[in-house]
Image: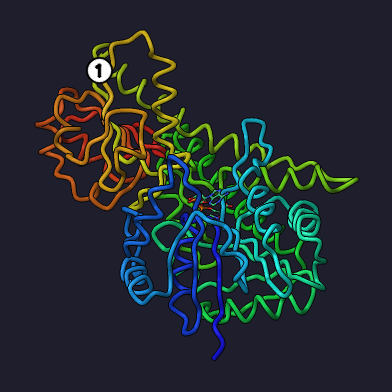
Amino acid sequence: MTKTRVVVIGMGYVGIPMAALLANVPDFYVTGIQRMSKRSGWKIDCLNSGKSPFEGEEPGLDELIERVVKNGKFNVTNKYDIIKEADYILIDVQTPVDDHKIPRYESLIDVSNKISRYLKKEVTIIIESTVAPGTTNNIVAPILEKGSGLKRGKDFFLVFSFERVMPGKLIEYITDFPRVIGGGCSEANEKAKFLYGKVVKKELQITDTLTAELTKCIENTYRDVNIAFANEMALVAESYNRNIFEIIELINHRHDRLMHMPGSGVGGHCLTKDPWLLMYGLETYTPHYYTPKILPESRRLNDYMPEHIVELMESALEEADKHDNLKIALFGVSYKANTDDTRNSPSEKIVSILKERYHSHNIEYIAHDPYVKKKDYHETDLTQNIDKALTGADVLIFATNHRDYYELDLNHIKIKVRTPILIDGRNIFNRNSLEKLGFYYRKVGEGNRAS
Ligand SMILES: NC(=O)c1ccc[n+]([C@@H]2O[C@H](COP(=O)([O-])OP(=O)(O)OC[C@H]3O[C@@H](n4cnc5c(N)ncnc54)[C@H](O)[C@@H]3O)[C@@H](O)[C@H]2O)c1
């Protein structure tokens, strides 16, 4: 059998599991390219020693990486000349937006330029990063053609096929979700089908490149808007002094309804930017376009939720008549339960709002997270020792629903803290149990006298 050589560029939440899964395919040999940045360069040695760089729970990933590295099927480098030997090149770099919601394509453009230098005929390039609709055809294809002197669809193939992973489910979501493939021509689609057919167990769905890009942006925007609706209804329920979680349960008991859950905010690399990518593509590549109304409002509402946590804290402090010399302890600095991903996490925003609003107050901050390492979090002191965070605290803010938090002993918490104020951003606790112990309790989505 002939060998298939794959290069995966960008060793992050998307690139690593895909590279490891492909390296596990017989006769597939995978090289990851990771730049030597301050933040991520260390991942090269980590992966080459057979270890996963993620601290959160990723079922199946540790064993897979260990196996493919040991078998000589997977290695990582910061050198690009390996591209000369590739049959497939996957692009998995980050695609954030700036403060004006404009895509920051430095990485995507840099990688496209570097690929074009080494590109040879018959190679298939697949963009897995999420991009604004129109980017594959209007930005990446021209760079590749100009730099290589080759023609897309004739000499090389360019496909957009987005990733659906989520930290905590990296392997499962690659293998067990259908895959959308948006190649520019049937040959490109066949090449991509050959590759993904080796690791994806569900359907491979073929469409055009722009439709594939739109599908990704709209799929994530759908979720962001649904969470915004849940967050808005949480605020409505609070105003009525009722409990949104009880209401959602009553609604979802009807089998054809699936209302999302509200919380302390939306974080991560994807939902916080994909609606902006969708709108950017519209404005940039479409002459007569509709201006979305609910999308920007949904983004703003989801971004407001960390501020609401601060408002709940202020109301509890008022009730407890506690105003200065505070120790505020934050629980959960990753944006998602049981993972180590801190990108755009609600707790990061909560801390920055608090520091700005109360910069002249005497406040000590501490954060706790079972998964996040100190090097990935710089907003406050960080501990993995729960008692260190609890001891002498005046305010406890739970921003992420890590599994450990459901098992906390409330009596123990009460003994450790100085002032029993607890702000629940993720529906972790029960009001009655806490109030019986004398806590000042506030929960996103539940009015103060709801029970
Ligand atoms: N994280 C998710 O759950 C998820 C899910 C679906 C889609 N996506 C999309 O996939 C893309 C990647 O996301 P991610 O979460 O894996 O990002 P990430 O930040 O975890 O990983 C990107 C990696 O690419 C590296 N990189 C950047 N520029 C490089 C270059 N020029 N050469 C080599 N390496 C370079 C970075 O250092 C980093 O290690 C984004 O477009 C994202 O929107 C992410």
In screen coordinates, is 340 left or right of 107?
A: left
Q: Is mark 1 within 8 Å of ligand 1?
A: no
- Residue 193: x %, y % from top left: 64, 79
Image quarter of the C terminus:
top left
- Residue 224: x %, y % from top left: 57, 48
Give the residue at x 49% y 66%.
Answer: 31
In screen coordinates, is 11 left or right of 301?
A: left
Q: Is residue 433 above or below residue 216?
A: above
Of residue 75 and residue 271, the one placed in the foreground of this image is 75
Q: Is residue 218 above or below residue 38?
A: below
- Residue 262: x %, y % from top left: 46, 45
Identity of the residue furthest to the right in this view: 287
Give the residue at x 34% y 70%.
Answer: 60
In screen coordinates, is 55 left or right of 342?
A: left
Of residue 317 and residue 104, the one placed in the foreground of this image is 104
Give the residue at x 76% y 51%.
Answer: 139
Provide the secondary structure element on which disc 1 rests: strand
Q: Is residue 50 above or below residue 334?
A: below
- Residue 28: x %, y % from top left: 50, 79
Q: How is the image coloured?
A: rainbow
Q: Which residue is mark 1?
A: 326
Q: Quadrant of residue 91?
A: bottom right
